[in-house]
Image (cartoon, helix red, strand yellow):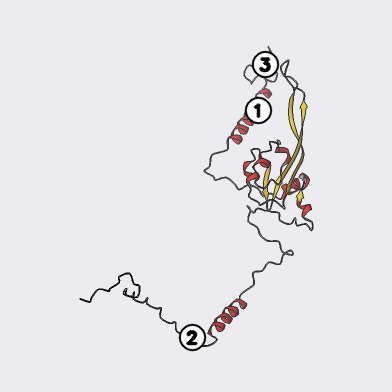
Amino acid sequence: MPPAPDNPTDPAAAPSAPAAPTAPDRPRGLPGSGLARGLAVTLRTMTRRAVTEHYPEAQPQLPPRSRGVIALFEENCTVCMLCARECPDWCIYIDSHKETAPAPEGAQPGARERSHNVLDRFAIDFALCMYCGICVEVCPFDALFWSPEFEYAETDIRELTHERDRLRAWMWTVPEPPALDERAEEPRELTAARRAADRAAADAAADEVPDADGRPGGGAPGGGAV
């Protein structure tokens, strides 16, 4: 048994740790072998057919859900300001005013006039927009849509704020929504509209059926002269 060191705290007296194993040296190839491999890749690429699209002579085939610009369907906008409030970049500018409409004809006596918002300005500053699509998703009235249009570059950054006329023109470039699955349920809006149309058609057909005296309206429930 070897004798213990006189000063255990002396680092020189402590036994040394075994040396870490070194990685084996890689065999070196021939001089210029890396250059030869790079030239081989270049030669293989040169023999393949080029896939470059000659834009703008040839327009690119974009996916149907491409995020190009945001189009505005002005008739559906109710100036609820939800898109402007939820925009993280505050790049949507909306101005409006209120107008009062008289009570509709045939309303009950004492019916109040109704006020509604009228859109004066709807603009998007695409120099600030980060194309997150939050405004399109939160719009409850389907007034904003994604358009694959992307050719709207300007020479002045101040001209990237497009007003509602330009946003409305981009609505014509919005692709049609994909068809529903054949096994999917019919939307409630379409079901209600179809039932109302069928009911109106049935009433119109019943009014054309003559009664016993030859007068129209005999086929409807309670039809005929009173």
Apparent side of residue 26 relative to residue 131 in the rendered image (left or right): left
Which quadrant does the C terminus fall into? top right
Is residue 7 depicted above or below 217 in this figure?
A: below
Q: Residues within 10 Å of mark 3 (few under 14, many from 20)?
A: some
Q: Of the numbered discs in the image, which one, if any, rests on residue 200?
A: 1
Residue type highlighted by circle 3: Gly
The residue singled out by tag 2 in the image is: 29
Q: In the current view of this chain or complex, which residue is farthest to the top? A: 226
Q: Label 2: state its secondary structure.
A: loop
Q: Position of residue 42 (x, y in %)?
A: 60, 79
Residue at 71% across, 17% down: 108
- The quadrant where residue 43 appears: bottom right
Looking at numbered disc 2 in the image, what kind of residue is underneath it? Gly
For marks 1 and 3, give the CA distance: 18 Å
How packed mark 2 is, by other alpha carbons closer than 10 Å (few <14, some 14-19, many 20 or more), is few
Label 1 SS: helix
State the residue in front, 13 or 97: 13
The reply to whether discs 2 and 3 touch (Cβ–Cβ < 8 Å) is: no
Relative to 1, residue 178 above or below: above
Residues marked 2 and 1 touching at CB (< 8 Å) = no
The residue that label 3 is drawn on is 224
Give residue 16's mark: none
